[in-house]
Image (cartoon, helix red, strand yellow):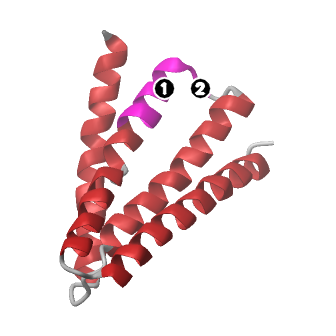
Amino acid sequence: MMRILLIGAGGFAGSILRYALSGLVQDAARDSLFPYGTLAVNVLGCLGIGVLMELAEARGAFGVETRALLVTGLLGGFTTFSAFGNETLYLLRDAERVLATANVLANVILGLAAVQLGRVAAQLVWR
């Protein structure tokens, strides 16, 4: 039961952080149809999960409860791949094929690169 509460608390915080950051970034690019807010959250979330999973797996830095709070809860509430899919679909529906393709490629390529960067950063910092 405690793990479920930790995941819920982390998800609550992550969702609020996602809403705030995504809104700030998208407001900065308000004249664009491209979903920059979602991209920023996805890349940052991928970076965060790279760092946390490297620390958990390679360093044993935290246990199951902390992992539930931070990875499943906080990052699960923070990352927005469901929003990514929805926004890409809207772009396709609006015949914005170039923007839809750019959105898919940017999220996937930058997300994967950020996970790797997070893992490498964690390896370098927490030796």
Question: Which quadrant would the N terminus be assigned to in this image?
Answer: top left
Residue 5 in the image: above or below residue 56: above
In this view, the residue farthest toward the right is 127
Q: CA distance from mark 2 to mark 1?
A: 6 Å
Question: Which quadrant would the C terminus be assigned to in this image?
Answer: top right
Q: Quadrant of residue 72?
A: top left
In reply to whether residue 78 is colored magenta, the answer given is: no
> Are the two marked residues, 2 and 1, in contact with CB atoms closer than 8 angstroms?
yes
Q: Quadrant of residue 53?
A: top right
In the image shown, does 6 or 40 lie closer to the viewer? Answer: 40
Which residue is rendered at x = 41% and y = 29% of the image?
69
Residue 117 horizontal side relative to residue 84, left or right = right
Question: Which residue is the site of mark 1?
Answer: 66
Residue 127 horizontal side relative to residue 92, left or right = right
Where residue 48 appears, x then y in whole percent? 52, 50
Q: Which mark is residue 62?
A: 2
| Type of secondary structure dominating the magenta stretch | helix
Which residue is rendered at x = 23% and y = 57% of the image?
19
In the image shown, does 38 or 8 lie closer to the viewer? Answer: 38
Which residues are the magenta region?
Answer: 62-73
In reply to whether residue 70 is colored magenta, the answer given is: yes
Residue type, mark 1 in image? Thr
In the image shown, does 43 or 124 lie closer to the viewer? Answer: 43
Residue type, mark 2 in image? Phe
Which residue is rendered at x = 26% and y = 47% of the image?
15
Where residue 56 appears, x then y in whole percent? 63, 31
Q: Number of marks in the image? A: 2
Where residue 112 appears, x then y in whole percent? 59, 57
SS under mark 2 = loop
SS under mark 1 = helix
